[in-house]
Image (tube, rainbow, N blue to C red):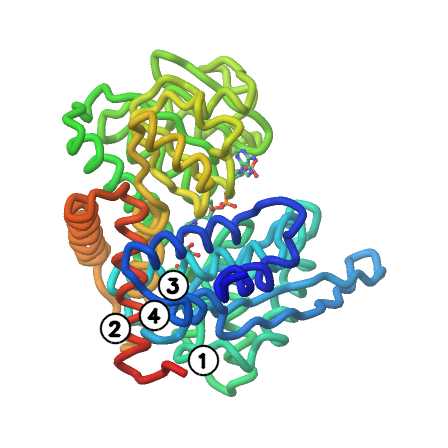
Amino acid sequence: MSASSTLHALVATEGAASRGPLDDALEQLDQAVVTLGFDDGTRNMLAAPRREVTVSIPLRRDNGTIEVLTGHRVQHNFSRGPAKGGLRYSPHVNLNEVRALAMWMTWKCALMRLPYGGAKGGVTIDPTQYSSAELERVTRRYTSEILPVIGPTRDIPAPDIGTDEQTMAWMMDTFSVASGHTVLGTVTGKPVGLGGSLGRAAATSRGVVFTALAALRHLDITVHGATAAVQGFGKVGRAAARFLAEAGVVITGVSDEHGAIWNPDGIDIPALESHVDRTGTVVDFDGATAIESDLLLTLEVDLMVPAAIEGVLNGGNAAYVRARIVVEGANGPTTTEADRILADSGTVVVPDILANAGGVVVSYFEWVQANQAYWWSEAEVEARLAERMESAWNEVLAEADRRDLPLRQAATCLAVRRVAEAHQQRGLYP
Ligand SMILES: NC(=O)C1=CN([C@@H]2O[C@H](COP(=O)(O)OP(=O)(O)OC[C@H]3O[C@@H](n4cnc5c(N)ncnc54)[C@H](OP(=O)(O)O)[C@@H]3O)[C@@H](O)[C@H]2O)C=CC1
Ligand SMILES: O=C(O)CCC(=O)C(=O)O
C-alpha cells in the first residue's frame, strides 16, 4: 500500500462501507497531484485536515426533555489565511462529509484568490423539527464549544444548508459576548443591519448564473430561450432560477426535497416563489406538472443546476443526463464516477469550486467591510463579484485548454498548486 492510499484509508474509515463525498474529494486531489507531478508527501499534507473538532451539544427542548446532538468543525487548511466555510444543519451531516466540504473550501478560496484556507462545520440535526428557540440554543452551545478555534483571524463560519443569517447573528453574538465586545468579522452571511454585506444573500446564485451564462456563450448557445432545470429551491437554487429566468433562460424543471415539477413551456418563477412562500414547497404548483424527482436530472435541457446536496449525479444516473452543461450550485453534486461518464458524453461540468464561489467571494467582501467598519454599496459589491467571477472563469478555461483537462480538473489543479506554493513559501514542509 502506498503512503497516499494508507492516508486515504485512515481518513476515510468512518465512511468505509460506501463511497461518499470524501472519497470523491480525495480522488479529485489525487488527479491534481498526478497532473502537477507532486510527490506523496505533498499530497498527504494537502489531504490531511489541519484540525478537527467534534463536540456534544446538550439541548433542553421546549418540552423540558434533554437531547444530545453532535457537531463538527473541520479546518482543512490555513496556509493562505484563516479558514473559511459554511455551517450546515442537516440530519445527514457526518464527519467525513464535513471533511470533504472543508477540503473543497480550501480549493475554492485558493481558486478565487481569497486570503483564506478552508473549513466547514455541521450539526447533525433536522432543523425543520425544532423551534426557533431550540435552534438558538443549539447554535449558541455549538458556538461556545468551538469558540477557541474560530474568530476573524482563525476561522470565519457562514451559512450553508439549513442555516441562515439568523444563525449567523446568534453565532456572532455568542462569540462577542465571550470576547467582551462586538466582533463583526466573526462570521459572514449576517443580517445587513448587523454588519452583513449588501449582496451576500444573492451572491452564490449570482455567481452560479454568471458561470452558467458564460458556459452557454462558450458553447455558442443563445442565452435567450436556452432551457434549464434547477434541483433545490433553497438559498442558492431559488435565486439562481430567478436570475436565469430574468436573463431569458426558460426554466422547465425545478425540485426540492418534497418533489419535482416540470413545464416544457417554462415555469413562471415569480409565481412559483409566491407558491413556495405560501406552502413551503414547489410541490402542487399549478403552473407545472408533477414528475418523479429522479427525472429532473435527466430532463433534456441546455443547463442543469444541481443546487441541493452531494452525489446526486452518480454512476447510477449520469449516463441518462441529457443536459449539455451542468453548473454545480451545490458542493459535490457530481461523483467522480459521474464526472467520467459526463466527460465521455461531452457534457460540460462547471465545477462547484468555481460555479458556487460567489458566496464566499462576497463573504470575503463582508469580512473586509466588517473589519474596516466601512460598507460598500450593493452596486460596488456586485461589480467586484462579477470581476472576480470573470477572471476565475477565464483562468480555469485557459488552464483547461493548456492541459487539455475538463474544467473541474483544471480548476482543482490551479487551486491545489496555489495552496502547495503557500506551504512551500512559508516553509511548512516537514
Ligand atoms: N448558501 C450558500 O451561500 C452556499 C451554498 N452552497 C451549496 O449549495 C447547496 C444548497 O445550499 P443552500 O441553498 O444554502 O441550502 P438551503 O438549505 O437553503 O436549501 C437546500 C435546498 O435543497 C433542497 N433539497 C434537499 N435535498 C434535496 C433532494 N434530495 N432533492 C432535491 N432538493 C433537495 C431543499 O429542499 P426543501 O426546501 O424541501 O428542504 C432546499 O430547497 C449546498 O450544497 C451548499 O453547500 C455553496 C456555496 C455557498
Ligand atoms: O461564505 C462562506 O464563507 C462559505 C460558503 C460555503 O460554505 C461554500 O462556499 O460552500
Q: How far apart are labels 3 and 2 at the CA level?
A: 27 Å
Pointer 4 or 2: first along the chain: 4
Pointer 1 or 2: first along the chain: 1
Which residue, given by chain and number where applicable, does mark 2 sit on? 374
Q: How far apart are labels 1 and 3 at the CA level?
A: 27 Å
Residue occupying image coordinates x 30% and y 25%:
324
Q: Are marks 3 and 2 in contact (CB under 8 Å)?
A: no
* Residue closer to the observer: 279 or 292: 292
Q: Which mark is residue 331?
A: none
Q: How far apart are labels 4 and 2 at the CA level?
A: 21 Å
Q: Residue furthest front?
A: 1
Pointer 4 or 1: first along the chain: 4
Q: Secondary structure at mark 1?
A: loop
Q: Position of residue 252 (x, y in %)?
A: 38, 19
**367 on left or right of 3:** left
Which residue, given by chain and number where applicable, does mark 1 sit on? 182
